[in-house]
Structures are given as C-alpha cells and as structure tokens.
Image (tube, rainbow, N blue to C red):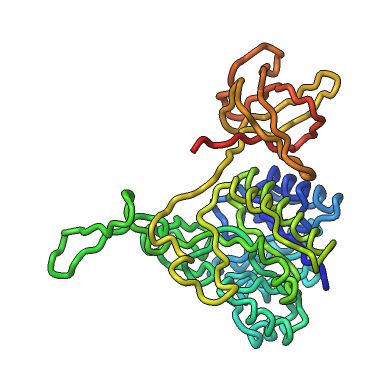
Amino acid sequence: MKKPEIVAPAGNFEKLKIAVLYGADAVYVGGKEYGLRAGAENFTFEELKQGIEFAHNRGCKVYITANIYAHNKDLEGMKIYFKKLKELNADGLIVSDPGAAVIAMENVPSIPLHLSTQANCTNWASALFWENMGFKRIILARELSISEIKEIRRKVSLELEVFVHGAVCVSYSGRCLLSSFLTGRSANRGDCSHPCRWKYYLMEEKRPGKYMPVFEDERGTYIFNANDLCMIEHIPELVEAGVDSFKIEGRMKSLHYVASVVKTYRQAVDSFFENPEGWECRDEWKEELSKVSHRKYTTGFFFGKPNFDGYNYSEAKYYRSSELVGKIIKYEPDKGMALVQQKNKFSVGDIVEILGPVGDPIKIKITEMKNAEGEPITEAPHPEQLVYIPVSVPVEENYIVRKPIAE
C-alpha cells in the first residue's frame, strides 16, 4: 500500500506555515491571478517565493492553482504568469482549462500538471485522455463513488487525488452560474458570492408579487445547501481504492481550521499505516473535527448518491465547539510565560486549550494577563494585540490557542 499524501489549503502565508507545521505533505495556494478563490488573501510572488522556501525546507510540496476558465483576454497574461512561476520551483500547477494546460505545456513543461476538480473528471476514459495529454495528477470530481474511483485506478497510472474534508459545492464540482446570474460575480473565475446559502421564497405564476416562504426554520429554507464532507472514518476504504492524495478544502477557512483538520488527518493516516489491520477511527479525532466551524458532516458521493441527509434542506447552520482566540508567538520558559497574538477576545478566568502539531491539546485556566509592555490587563479585546499569559507546560511558536464556546 502506498501512503497517501495529505494536501492542505493555504489562503495566505500564515496559514501555509500552520499547514506545513501541523503535518501536511503538500499545500495548495493561489497567486493573485487565475485561481478560483478570489476571496482568499492569496500570495504575491514574493510571498509565493517565501512560502515555497518555507515548505521545501521542511519536506513539504507546494501546488499553485490557476484553475479559472479562461477567456481570450486572459491567455497572454497567463503565459507570462506561468513563466514567472517556473522561477519559484513550484511542485505542481493546478489547471482546469485545456487552453491553460496547452499554454503551460508549451511554456513551463518542467512544472507537473494537475487537473483541477473543476474540470469534472468522472470516468476512466476522461482520466486516460488527460494522462495521455501529459498530466501527472487528476483531482477527481467530488461526485464519484469509491467503486468508481477503483475502476479509474485500474485503468490509469497517473496520480489520483480526492477531496476528503470540507465544504462541498451544490453544483457539479463547482461549475455554477447562480453567482454570475444573481450578482455578476463568476464562480468559474474565482469570485463566487455563495448564493446557494441564501434564503429563498416561492412565487406562484398567477400571483405576481406575492412571495411565499417555504418554512423549514425561522430563518428560511436552504434548498441548495450542501453538508460538509468528512471522511475521517473511512481512511482504509480510500487507501484500498488507490487514492494517492487526500485533499482538504478550505483556503478561506481559519488558522484553527487548518491546524485542527490537518493534524487530525495526519494522525489518522499515520495510525492506519502503523496498524492497518487493527485501525479504528478514534473518538478524539471526531471530537477534534467538531471543534472547528462546519456544517453537518456527510460522506458525500463516496458510498452512492446522497439522500436528503446529504443536503441541509432544513438549515444553514454552522457548528463548532471552540473558537480561535490566539496564536503563540514565543515562549519564555524561565518565566513560564507565552506571548500570544490575539485573534478573538479572551479574558482572565477563561479556560483555554493550546493545540500544537503533536500531542494532546493542553488545557489551562488563564490566571493573569499582561500586555506587551508587561502591564497587567484583564482582557485582550483588540485584534492582533500581543498578550502574555502564564503557561506551565512548554509550548512553541505557532501553537494555537482556543476556547470552548458555551452552548
């Protein structure tokens, strides 16, 4: 059995560092152009250079997205962009548009090509076509079952990547015109406004102007609203299917999400390969994934077409049992104090957990706080404020500080 790669999202340089440190084998990132997450901060060329150096120094690969569906006006600039990417020593280029693929092959043949899930590869004949075109990897459409993936695996030799965790688009692998139609923002060019999460009403043909709500909860109906994917309990089936790469969705998600989800899948995959026969999904892994913001979890199409349980027809609610409050900048062992960069408000008396790349979360009560000048304070209300808190157990830079959310 080949151990699958864990590919983590990185919406900016800070999240890239967290993904790498918490166990990713590779990260996928977007530059300022041609990617499908215009709402993420994304990377300048200088940040891409720094990010790739940081990842490579720790044995982690970096894949760069350029997976928009290009128009004529994009093509010349794309050629220049790809040539600049070659200088950065990227490990892969993710594209969906055949024209973009040809431009990449002609101008940067040394960068391995990955076919984006946006290209909707759903069968072995299509996969074989892309393999013959020279692609190294296909990120398969999310609408495939494990049995279909197995058949594709038998027919092709290129690498297969599947999404195993995160948000799922209601449309076919992300090809959607709702956003363009309703807001003028194209999902296929990285600027989706997520109208599938909005509240909708019905209007009967002979009653123009009379809007009738479809009551499912007090906030409206959510007829398009997909649940979030979670395959943490099904590592063995994915490995047996011959999947080469497990992909985590979430370039617009928080530091907490990246740290928690990457670490959990790292532990689960490593545990399986240490003891395949005796592997069981641990309760603490499922509990950890419940702490980050998510919709109800589903296994998507992996075990057949989803029934109504696969979609949130009744709500658009997000769940989480913890929230990020800070990130540790440094630890001073002689003083037993950690310097924390505030992300959300926390106060003296709060019970918090400190999450690091390895080991169990550390639970402490904040008994005192000091600002960067060493003056006593009782709370940290300001974004990015630097605060000292006492931590008796040694911790390190880039550990995550979170606190439970009262139900």
Q: Residue at x 57, y 60 (%)?
A: 36
**Quadrant position of the N terminus in the picture:** bottom right
Image position, residue 45 (x, y; %)? 71, 50
- The spot of residue 85 in percent (x, y) is 74, 59
Query: In this orientation, does residue 63 appear?
Result: no
Residue 59, x across and y down, in percent? 85, 55
User: Is residue 14 found left or right of 58 in the rendered image?
Assistant: left
Give the image location of residue 198, x and y in percent. 38, 55
Up-down relation of residue 362 to residue 293 (above or below) = above
Residue 144's place in the image compared with 89, above or below, is below
Compared across the picture, whether 143 is left or right of 3 comes to left
160 or 232: nearer the eye? 232
**Residue placed furthest toward the left:** 206
Along the viewing direction, whichever of 13 and 23 lies nearer the viewer: 23
Q: Quadrant of residue 92?
A: bottom right
The tally of labels here is 0
